[in-house]
Amino acid sequence: MPTIECDPSEARDRLAAAGVEIEPGNTPHERWRAERDEAVAVAYDGKVVVQGSAPTALTALLRDAGDRAHVYFDGASRGNPGPAAVGWCLVTSDGIVAEGGERIGRATNNQAEYQALIAALEAAADFGFDEIDVRGDSELIVKQVRGEWNTNDPTLREYRVDARELLEKFDRWSIAHVPRSVNERADDLANEALDDRDT
């Protein structure tokens, strides 16, 4: 059960800015309570205690500015173009902070990779990270974003511009190609989204 020493008013503002609903405390000692996913934050004088099975959903929002995250992304397309999905994962020293996977309709594999990168960067920005190290198993996307390779495809060019604009919002960022085995969680999330026939 993580305990974060902080000003509860500032912590409340930080959570509210991230779209987390704040409720009154349940006891006279509780200043307020907030819930996201499987985590509940309870504020007391001088500290916030986070409970639940996924505390990093809130601890990442409550930590001091300057923290960094590893951002993993992966896109999948069956048919190229065909049904496509994205997967992404944000990881800190506390573990997985957030992750997601969803279908994106029909796309090529490279389009799905870019959309996964953009979704991951938007999530990292929502969590307020100042520094990120982005990792993906698409060498093409990584080298295009770094400016090492050009693209003649207008759709990919537009995605690259969007990704670079998002990256420039961070104080420091890097992007690197990694083997699929290192990017396994993002890959699993993208494929699970494709396999889920109910969405």
Image: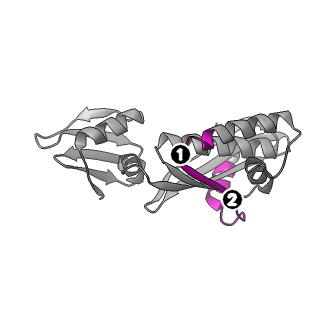
Residue at (84, 33) in percent of width and height: 154
Question: Would residue 109 be visible to someone looking at this image?
Answer: yes
Q: Which mark is on residue 87?
A: none
- Is 37 located above or below residue 142 in the figure? above
Q: Quadrant of residue 183?
A: bottom right
- Is 139 located above or below residue 28 in the figure? below
In the orientation shown, which residue stands out farthest toward the right? Answer: 152
Residue at (89, 39) in percent of width and height: 152
> Picture coordinates of residue 27 (x, y %)?
13, 41
For this view, does 198 lie left or right of residue 63?
A: right
> Picture coordinates of residue 95 (x, y %)?
47, 60
Instruction: Write the start and end of the magenta stretch as one range.
Output: 166-191
Q: Amino acid at mark 2?
A: Ala
Q: Which mark is on residue 124?
A: 1
For this view, does 57 lie left or right of residue 51?
A: right
Residue at (48, 48) in percent of width and height: 129
Q: CA distance from mark 1 to mark 2?
A: 16 Å
Which residue was labeled with disc 2?
176
